[in-house]
Image (tube, rainbow, N blue to C red):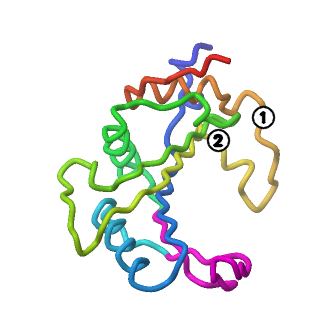
Amino acid sequence: MSEKSNPMRKIGVYKVVVNIGVGEAGERLVKAEKVLQMLTGHKPVRTQSRMTNRDFNIRKHMPIGVKVTLRGKDATDFVKRALWTKEYRLADYSFDPEGNFSFGIKDHTTFEGVKYDPEIGVFGMDISVVLKRKGYRIAERKKERKKLPAKQRISREEGIEFAEKEFNAVIIREVS
């Protein structure tokens, strides 16, 4: 059976996580929430520190960042907009062995239609894209959970190929 005729072999975007790490609570955290709300159209969730670090004046469970998880059409649309800011270029080291990829944006004002606001300032963000095939639920369900078969897993090369086809990404390969 070829990949085109078998719908279970089709790769899709499972979720996209957009994260802004501020490193401190307070006014900057509220501004970062506004930026994520504006860019994604979804309400962000605050992330908390896992441990105390006295050098950075951070206590355990202190809010230090915000994130949004996008799924479905919202996720693919956001990835297309985010890749536009990077001129559709991704480094090959952005892909992990399971085909997922992550990249960063240094300035949120590079998004199309977003203007600089001196009250908010400039925020960078990390974007992580998780890819899955249909049938992945076998590894995550409660009853009769099983390992995902090797045929159902996504390789790094398949993830790169998906990004090139779906998002017209140009993969920059590092020569060692």
Q: Residue at x 33, y 60 (%)?
A: 40
Q: Is residue 98 above or below residue 21?
A: above
Q: Are marks 1 and 2 in contact (CB under 8 Å)?
A: no
- Which three-letter amino acid code belongs to the residue tagged 1? Pro
Q: Is 64 covered by the magenta stretch? A: yes
Q: Is residue 80 above or below residue 175?
A: below
Residue at the spot of label 2: 135
- Classify 10 Å Cα crowding around label 1: few (below 14), some (14-19), many (20 and above): few
Q: Position of residue 75 (x, y in %)?
A: 41, 50
- Classify 10 Å Cα crowding around label 2: few (below 14), some (14-19), many (20 and above): few
Magenta span of residues: 46-68
Q: Residue at x 49, y 42 (%)?
A: 13
Residue at the spot of label 1: 149
Element type at mark 2: loop
Element type at mark 1: loop
Q: Residue at x 73, y 81 (%)?
A: 52
Q: Position of residue 28 (x, y in %)?
A: 40, 77
Q: Is 126 covered by the magenta stretch? A: no
Q: Nearer the viewer, residue 105 or 80?
A: 105
Q: Is residue 110 above or below residue 163?
A: below
Q: Residue furthest top?
A: 2
